[in-house]
Image (tube, rainbow, N blue to C red):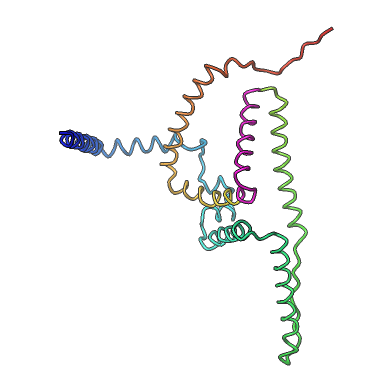
Amino acid sequence: MPEKISEDLFNNLVETIADSVSKQKSVSFFEEEKSNSVVSGFNRLFGRQRPVHHILGGGKSADVLLWRNKKISASFLASATLIWVLFEWLNYHFLTLLSFALVLGMVVQFVWSNASGLLNRSSSQVPHLVLPDELFVSIGRSVGAEVNRGLQYLQDVSCQGNLKQFLVIAVSLWVAAVIGSWCNFLTVLYIGFVAAHTLPVLYERYDEQIDGFVYKMLDQFQNHYKKLDSGFLSKIPKGKFKLKKHD
């Protein structure tokens, strides 16, 4: 008896799925094309109007992140993975790897400079490795500009007196601290590097599906936020806090 009931339920479920599929297939081609055009026209993530390549800068860095040249992008990702494996899995230290690399470079230069004498050939000059000063200046300027921008943003949030925004930033920093307690800084950098080399190319390839999914999640989050705002956040006073003066 229970087997018969379960079989009947399974058959009803199959029939319901078949009916829904047939109804979806009965939609005309023009209506489907129109709905897709409307979704692609309005549901763009972060309201973007330009391609992902232009948003990422449109230069060589964007080509690497979007895998325009698969060999270069794969080499960057493989190098980052190798560094992470050496430091995290094999427990190497930066000073150890640096010393080994310098010793290896000195051995190669020594053999290069003295191989001509051993082979009775004319001496060959070893090319000198010189890093340009502009490289370090540009790196320092870019890092300093980003750090100053972040500090300025945190200072503005702290001094403007908007308690809601202050609580959001504080909770975000607390979440970052919790994530940092789970793994070290190098692992966090590696996860961010892998995400930067995988998420943009996946979004460029499946942008319509991702946009639809993200907007559905945002709608649900907005509904929950409205409930939270009407019940708790709306009661928080806005504006700057003023201290009362006591005579």
Number of marks drawn:
0
Q: Which residue is drawn at 69% across and 38% down?
A: 150
Could you tell whether 83 is left or right of 222 in the image?
right
User: Could you say where residue 88 lies in the image, as x and y percent from the top left?
Assistant: 61, 56
Could you tell whether 224 is left or right of 185 in the image?
left
Q: Which residue is drawn at 84% across and 7% down?
A: 247
User: Could you say where residue 93 lies in the image, as x and y percent from the top left?
Assistant: 69, 59
Instruction: Tell which residue pokes out farthest to the top in this image.
Output: 247
Could you tell whether 220 is left or right of 182 in the image?
left
Question: Quadrant of the image for the N terminus?
Answer: top left
Does the magenta run of residues contain 164?
Answer: yes
Instruction: Tell which residue pokes out farthest to the right in this image.
Output: 247
Q: Which residue is drawn at 49% across and 50% down?
A: 201
Relative height, residue 97 to residue 218 (above, below)? below
Q: Please tell me whether the stretch drawn in magenta is mainly helix, strand or loop.
A: helix
Relative height, residue 237 to residue 217 (above, below)? above
User: Could you say where residue 191 lies in the image, as x and y percent from the top left?
Assistant: 57, 49
In this view, the residue in front, 199 or 192, is 192
Q: Give the range drawn in magenta.
A: 163-189
